[in-house]
Amino acid sequence: MSLQNNFSQTSPFGKITLLVVLMMVGVVIALLVLVGLNLAFFHVPTDVVNHISSSSSAMAINAAKVLQITSQIGLFVLPAFVFAYLTSSSATTGLKLNRRAKLQSAMLVIVITLLAIPFINLLAQWNMDWHLPESWHVVEEWMRRTQDTNDKMITVLAQMNTKTDIVVNVLMMAILPAIGEELIFRGILQPQMIKMTRNAHLGIILTAVIFSAFHLQFLGFFSRAILGIIFGYLFYYSKNIRYPMIAHFVNNMFALGLIMVFGTKLEETNFENPYDTTTIAIAIITFGLSIALFWFTNTQFKKETEQVETI
């Protein structure tokens, strides 16, 4: 008996529950695969991989990269396609992968993303300086320790000494997150949140908040939430998951490109004062241009949707 499309009539809450279960199963499968790979190739203690640092061996760093890649596939990509299989007649249709991105619209999406980045980065820098009330100091300390651990791990993993390192890092930090996270959060979760709230804007915002919280990097919470909102509206108006994937890839690739140019100690260099009026003005102006260009691009999205519906 085939399970395909068996859950198509399930309620939005039921589908979200199904998604969570599939993601949990995906994590278990990924862990089993990782244990097998470690026993076969790396022979690295698990705690070494989880606490990777600049002093770690090349084998441990490679094992950590395999952990990141396998985890992303198990947590995001695999559950997304299984979910689409269980809830629709076609996985590609269920995930809105059945339409190609138009070159003109894709280029506009790239420009929209690049124009938004200065404001997103500025907000992230402000977020780093925000403090919780004194009564929440234990929570804030935990958040900053978590952020510091994540930053150190990214710094180590982002080192690119060979062409292979560059290819692996682009896959690990740009391609897989853009595909997997957009399939889960925009392709699956966002439509269900919109149905549950019966409000497109509220559904998009709530999905973006969940998307940001899921990363467990709370000192960049608001900037990542804004990114999630941008990705959400790109998907909502285009009805094509490829556009938020492109935007997500551009954002991550921009950060990775800065590391390629300036090195992994980029965060230790202050290129600008986040409280300088000129910096703030530039960030607001470019973000305003990004929003304006988005509304222009929305016209392109409508034309594409109408063309598909008339075929």
Image (cartoon, helix red, strand yellow):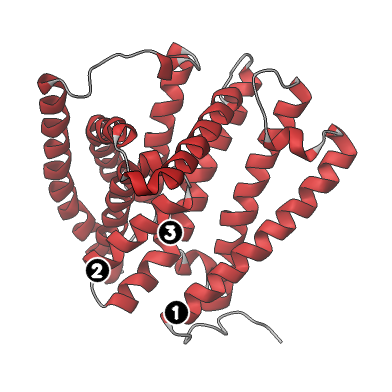
Q: Quadrant of residue 123?
A: top left
Q: Nearer the viewer, residue 204 or 222?
A: 222
Residue corresponding to mark 1: 13
Sequence order check: which comes first, mark 2 or mark 1?
Answer: 1
The answer to whether residue 285 is seen in the rendering is yes
Quadrant for the C terminus, please: bottom left
Please state which amino acid type lies under the numbered disc 1: Phe
Relative to 274, is 256 on the left or the right?
A: right
Sequence order check: which comes first, mark 2 or mark 3?
Answer: 3
Given this view, does label 2 or label 1 mark the residue nearer the observer?
A: 1
The CA span between labels 2 and 3 is: 14 Å
Picture layout, residue 301 above or below residue 171: below
Residue corresponding to mark 2: 200
Quadrant for the N terminus, please: bottom right
Please tell me which residue is depicted at 85% across the width and 47% down the height of the picture.
36
Q: Quadrant of residue 274?
A: top left
Residue corresponding to mark 3: 185
Q: Which mark is residue 126?
A: none
Q: Residue 289 at what x, y percent from top left?
A: 12, 36
Please state which amino acid type lies under the numbered disc 3: Phe
